[in-house]
Amino acid sequence: MKKLITYITPSLMETSFTIDIMNIMNDNGADIIELGIPFSDPAADGPTIEEASLKALQNGFKVNDIIDIIKQTKDIPLYLMGYFNSFYNKGFEYFFDNEFDNLKGLVIPDLSYEESLTYLGTFDKYNKNLVSFATPLSDKKRLEKVLINSRGFIYLVAYAGVTGGGQDTNLDDVITNIRDCSDTPIYLGFGVNENNAKEKSKNIDGVIVATYIIKILLDDSISYNEKSKKIATICKNIKNEINS
């Protein structure tokens, strides 16, 4: 069965609401949740997630809040998605030393493969995954190099650009090359929604839905209850679509 990975920025509302939404997503088809660490300069994120990050920081988000959320969502498989500075300042051990079984690993878009080699020993020590990235511009020689240590899943970026925008790109060649290099599951991110999830999930193992959900959480014209219902429906629909 193909997997659905959803994304949430904490501290857009109260922590209790963040946890409620995470449970709703989990109960309605999300297999993994990416918990985004708000950052002041989210280089890989489009305007929607950037707005969410800035709003969370204005609401007083602290990295320590992430630990409280992980503690209260022990039954949900999680990945932390954040920029290297957030992890470097605290140290990877800060996130790993609590031995949360539900925290499977990290997604760090601005950490290059070459730089990541310095830290793989820490990931091995705590049995956590550092997600590898592939893009439509990745040639086979590069993929053979960067995917040799891939674990958890491979984050396939749908197009060159930032989250929530960009043009569709033919991914057949890069998917074939990834399969030749690695058996790690491939999950596609950037621009996935209810209307295109089925098409985008072809030949891969799952999809990552981020901006589409964050837009609902940022919509101040609807109530918490309406946001919860909309997100539950989105998760159900996408999970059904990619597996139909």
Image (tube, rainbow, N blue to C red):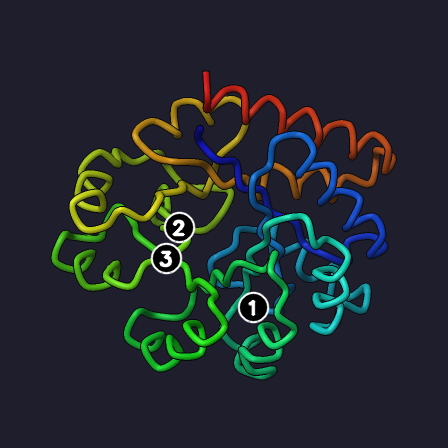
Considering the image in quadrants, where does the N terminus appear?
A: top left
Compare marks 2 and 1 and give the one earlier in the sequence: 1
| Residue 48 in view in this figure | no
Q: Which kind of residue does numbered mark 1 sit on?
A: Asp
- Crowd rating for badge 3 (residues with CA inside 10 Å; few <14, some 14–19, many 20+): some
Q: Nearer the viewer, residue 242 or 82?
A: 242
Q: Nearer the viewer, mark 3 or mark 1?
A: 3
Judged from the image, the secondary structure of the residue bearing numbered disc 2 is: loop
Considering the image in quadrants, where does the C terminus appear?
A: top left
Where residue 230 appears, as percent x and y from the top left, is 73, 28
Q: Which residue is mark 2?
A: 153
Look at 69% across and 34% down and name the residue there: 27
Q: Is residue 3 depicted above or below 124 in this figure?
A: above
Where residue 208 appears, as percent x and y from the top left, is 49, 41
Q: Which kind of residue does numbered mark 3 sit on?
A: Arg
Q: Give the spatial CA distance, label 3 vs label 1.
A: 27 Å
Look at 54% across and 20% down and name the residue there: 240
Q: Which residue is mark 1?
A: 41
- Crowd rating for badge 2 (residues with CA inside 10 Å; few <14, some 14–19, many 20+): many
Judged from the image, the secondary structure of the residue bearing numbered disc 1 is: loop
Q: Which residue is mark 3?
A: 151
Q: Which kind of residue does numbered mark 2 sit on?
A: Phe
Compare marks 3 and 1 and give the one earlier in the sequence: 1
